[in-house]
Image (cartoon, helix red, strand yellow):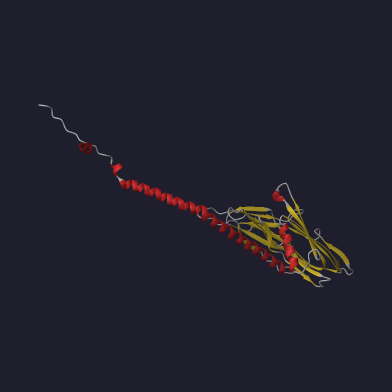
Amino acid sequence: MSPQYTSYSANSTGDRIKRSPRWDDDEGVAATVGTIMSLMVFLTLMGIFTNQFVPAWMNDNESTHTSQVIEQFISLKSSIDVSISYNPNSIVAPSPIFVPVTLSTPGIPVFAGPTAGILTLSPDTLNQRPSLNLTYTWVSTVSGAPQTYILSKDNDGHSGGDLDLYCPNRYFVEQHVIYEGGAVILNQTDGEFIVAGPQLSVRNMGSLASPDWVIMMTEVTIKGLNNTIGGTGSKGVTAILDYADTNTLSNPVPGDLRIDIVSQHGMAWKEYFNRTFNSSGMRPNIDYTIQSTFVPMSNPLNSYYTVTVIVHNVGTLDHTRATVTLSIGELGII
């Protein structure tokens, strides 16, 4: 008899060889594809948020911060102005002034940190910028006989010093907010202007053909220690009025009042005097003249302007000179 052989077929072979379960599990493949698709959707949405919403959100935050700082600087200026107005020739001691200044822009949790700021106090020193000098000749009869005097930077006609907050914005335009000469200045890359001017009043007591101008002006000198604070959060600014006095300087024959300004923000001062004098009825190049010169330095950050303002036919100058000591720190204490 012939040997017994087992018969084989394609079907029997398939039954004997068992495939791995992982190749038969269609549900596992679908789960993997679903996870990848979910991650792609998440990353797409995250990219849109970080590239579109975060810059717009931070731009709005930095713009709002600038408005907030301007309000804080104007509050400081207004408090100093009120204290000066009440103090001349007064026997009541002026009240200390405290104003918090917000250095940084709020950030966005997880996505963007706050934008830090730098607050710098530069007190008045001889031959240092900024400075504002008045020159005016008047006749005094205090001693009995008429005598001619000259108000100049050497005898109470000088003021200087400033407080500067630098906002190096990452999304909004970078800006400086400055308090100098009794004015609040906003400076940015595309220009600068005086947001709130110093105490200045212009009136004509004569006629258009023969004007007799009465100028009321306050000079504010900033004293203190040179100091710079950077970081986030808020820092305090303390102001103490040390001295304020007002003198009326009259001239029987109206003369010239000369104002010399040396500042990095000369264009803002020039525009301010032009706007103020024009609104008071003064005629440019007739009742007043303004000249400005740019002085470049090797370091562009140290370049500055000299602005010369001459007002003709000034019969009376009500001149107020004030000295304020500023300090900056956690509680306004250095």
In this picture, residue 230 sits left or right of residue 143 = left
* Residue 50 x, y percent position in the rendering: 50, 52
Residue 265: image location, x then y, percent = 71, 57
Where does the image place residue 164, in percent across and percent down from the top left? 66, 56
Q: Which residue is drawn at 64% across and 59% down?
A: 237
Residue at 65%, 53% (x, y): give it: 228
Q: Does residue 71 lie above or below 166 as drawn?
A: below
Q: Is residue 303 visible?
A: yes
Residue shown at 69%/53% (left/top)? 226
Q: Relative to residue 209, is residue 152 depicted above or below?
A: above
Residue 296 percent location from the top left of the image:
74, 50
* Foreground pick, 47 / 187: 47
Q: In which quarter of the image is residue 104?
A: bottom right
Q: Which of 175 and 246 is in front in this view?
A: 175
Q: Is residue 156 visible?
A: no
Q: Which residue lies furthest to the top in this view?
A: 1
Which residue is at the front of the view, 44 or 183? 44
- In the rendered view of the protein, which quadrant contains the N terminus? top left
Camera-nearest residue between 27 and 288 = 27
The image quadrant that residue 72 belongs to is bottom right
